Image (cartoon, coloured by chain):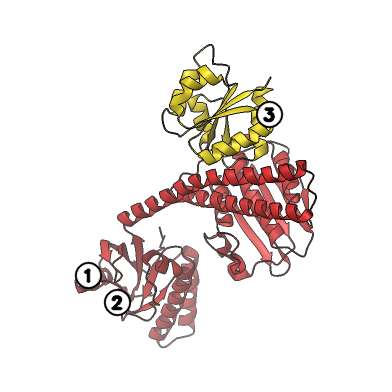
């Protein structure tokens, strides 16, 4: 079955390249440029994994994680935090993300981390 | 902050006194000649210290004319004209300040004046820059107080330091922001390669261009990383994440990676450590990468690079990187660790690599040095505490 990945990023250049790469490897993806759309995403798109830019308009990374992790129906969805900040490894732990990708990342790194959580 | 030794070192004392005794034994008739010779010698030594000091310093003679300064003075004050030979008065404005300085000079030269540093908290330079001025009297047993040597030390005012921190903050923000378009560039370039491969395009020219773009993306990436490290160092925000690490694995892994970047060189590892060391693995890897890539870059005609690791007695490890390349002239060997220093005037980087490397090693409580002979090669060696006390 095709796995679904939600891309939360307000930088459309980044979001699109991530989408293009993932779709080439047969993932179904959807871009959300405002984190307030998380409810809608969980309800309608039902992602198997979330790629989350930790700084974007709307809710903070922590608030998003809070909407996903305590809920039994959604707490299995891995959250991968994405950022150009150096402190990303610490921040991702703090907000409750499962893993992180530090910018600038390679295509293979993206695919590797996605595979790690989806296969 | 400059450290001025106002009293001569013990050894130095002994040496000078012995010379003075010698002088007496030789029945030097004119003590004045001896002292003036001594003064010239001391002034020459101070000139040398000013040259290598990394604080903005000015040395003046008894007529208040400037006889020595250094690049840091020009960098700090943004004054561009050569100031050597000019009166110290020509540096400041308005005139009132100058009379203030003259009275301070008189004061500090007074025999019974106990302080040898007087500070003017805010002083305006001719180019309207504000700075803090320290007027320092260097005492020496061979000099009478009224003959004392006077040094001017200019420091950025607190306000200036704050503005410069703000600038660095902007650089840091910019650096982080640049990582995003860089990620896009990388991604699209890799996609182009994949697409060509999948469509069975075999024209080597196409792949050559993709390689070129990739090389430039990597260069841009390392420039951004160096800029970010520089801002981190400046704002004192480079924190180390210590963990126990198998150093042998780290070095072998790194050598394997770096051998991919060179067609010509073999990187040979000698020695190994028996125990794990506690370091910031990422940062030490960065420092070592820097030394090995420099070794590759500056030894285009030789094939061998030797990396030696060993344990020393006092819970210290020693790591050296040796190349057989163009070497570094003696007078440049310390300068290469300075920020923004361009070795050989080659402008293919920011001149921050060795500055950052040194900072990383020092931050671990270690030290780094270089031995080099022109056209024979260089050995960079650093020592690190295997288990530092601080974390």
Q: Which chain contains the residue that carries disc 2?
A: B
Callout 1: helix, strand or loop?
helix
Q: Is residue B160 left or right of residue B182?
A: left
Query: Residue A26 has which mark?
Result: 3
Asked if badges 3 and 2 are on one and the same chain, I answer no
Going by the picture, which residue comes out furthest to the front? B199
Real-space Cα distance between discs 2 and 1?
11 Å
Q: Which chain contains the residue that carries disc 1?
A: B
Closest to the observer, B236 or B351: B351
Above or below: residue A61 compared with residue B278: above
Residue appearing at x 39%, y 64% in the figure: B76
Q: Quadrant of the N terminus of chain B?
A: bottom left
Real-space Cα distance between discs 1 and 3?
75 Å
Callout 3: helix, strand or loop?
loop
Q: Position of residue B26 (x, y in %)?
A: 49, 85
Callout 2: helix, strand or loop?
helix
Closest to the observer, A77 or B125: A77
Real-space Cα distance between discs 3 and 2?
73 Å
Residue appearing at x 42%, y 33% in the figure: A57
Question: Are there few (<14), some (14-19), or many (20+) residues within 10 Å of tag 3?
Answer: few
Q: Position of residue B246 (x, y in %)?
A: 69, 36
Contact, CB < 8 Å: mark 2 with mark 1? no
Above or below: residue A9 compared with residue B291: above
Query: Residue A3 has which mark?
Result: none
Residue appearing at x 67%, y 22% in the figure: A2
Q: Position of residue B190 (x, y in %)?
A: 67, 44
> Which chain shows up in red?
B
Query: Residue B90 has which mark?
Result: 2
Chain A painted colour: yellow
| Residue identifier under label 1 | B97
């Amino acid at each position: 079955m095709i796995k679904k990945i939600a891309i939360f990023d307000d930088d459309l250049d980044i979001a699109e390249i991530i989408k293009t790469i993932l779709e080439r490897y047969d993932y179904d993806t959807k871009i959300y440029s405002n984190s307030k759309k998380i409810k809608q995403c969980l309800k309608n798109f039902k992602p198997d994994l979330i790629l989350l830019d930790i700084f974007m308009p709307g809710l903070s990374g922590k608030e998003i994680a809070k909407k996903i992790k305590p809920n039994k129906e959604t707490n299995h969805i891995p959250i991968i935090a994405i950022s150009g900040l150096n402190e990303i490894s610490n921040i991702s732990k703090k907000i409750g993300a499962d893993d992180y990708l530090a910018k600038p990342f390679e295509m293979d790194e993206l695919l590797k981390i996605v595979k790690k959580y989806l296969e | 902050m400059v450290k001025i030794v106002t009293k001569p070192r013990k050894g130095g004392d002994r040496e000078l006194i012995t010379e003075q005794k010698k002088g007496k034994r030789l029945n030097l008739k004119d003590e004045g000649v001896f002292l003036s010779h001594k003064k010239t010698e001391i002034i020459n030594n101070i000139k040398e210290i000013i040259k290598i000091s990394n604080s903005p310093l000015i040395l003046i003679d008894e007529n208040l004319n400037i006889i020595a300064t250094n690049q840091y003075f020009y960098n700090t004050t943004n004054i561009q004209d050569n100031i050597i030979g000019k009166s110290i008065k020509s540096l400041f404005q308005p005139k009132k300040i100058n009379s203030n300085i003259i009275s301070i000079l008189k004061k500090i030269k007074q025999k019974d004046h106990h302080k040898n540093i007087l500070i003017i908290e805010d002083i305006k330079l001719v180019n309207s820059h504000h700075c803090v001025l320290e007027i320092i009297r260097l005492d020496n047993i061979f000099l009478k107080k009224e003959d004392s040597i006077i040094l001017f030390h200019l420091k950025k005012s607190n306000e200036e330091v704050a503005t410069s921190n703000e600038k660095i903050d902007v650089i840091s923000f910019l650096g982080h922001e640049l990582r995003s378009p860089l990620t896009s560039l990388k991604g699209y370039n890799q996609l182009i390669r994949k697409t060509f491969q999948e469509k069975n395009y075999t024209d080597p020219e196409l792949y050559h261009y993709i390689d070129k773009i990739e090389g430039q993306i990597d260069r841009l990436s390392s420039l951004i990383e160096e800029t970010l490290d520089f801002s981190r160092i400046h704002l004192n925000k480079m924190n180390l994440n210590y963990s126990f690490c198998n150093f042998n694995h780290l070095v072998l892994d790194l050598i394997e990676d770096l051998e991919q970047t060179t067609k010509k060189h073999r990187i040979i590892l000698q020695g190994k450590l028996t125990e794990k060391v506690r370091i910031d693995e990422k940062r030490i890897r960065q420092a070592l990468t820097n030394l090995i890539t420099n070794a590759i870059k500056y030894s285009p005609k030789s094939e061998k690079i030797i990396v030696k690791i060993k344990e020393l007695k006092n819970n210290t490890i020693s790591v050296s990187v040796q190349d057989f390349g163009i070497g570094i002239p003696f007078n440049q060997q310390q300068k290469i660790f300075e920020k923004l220093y361009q070795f050989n005037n080659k402008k293919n980087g920011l001149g921050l690599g060795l500055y950052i490397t040194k900072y990383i090693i020092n931050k671990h409580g270690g030290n780094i040095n270089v031995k080099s002979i022109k056209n024979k090669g260089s050995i960079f060696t650093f020592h690190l505490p295997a288990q530092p006390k601080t974390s």
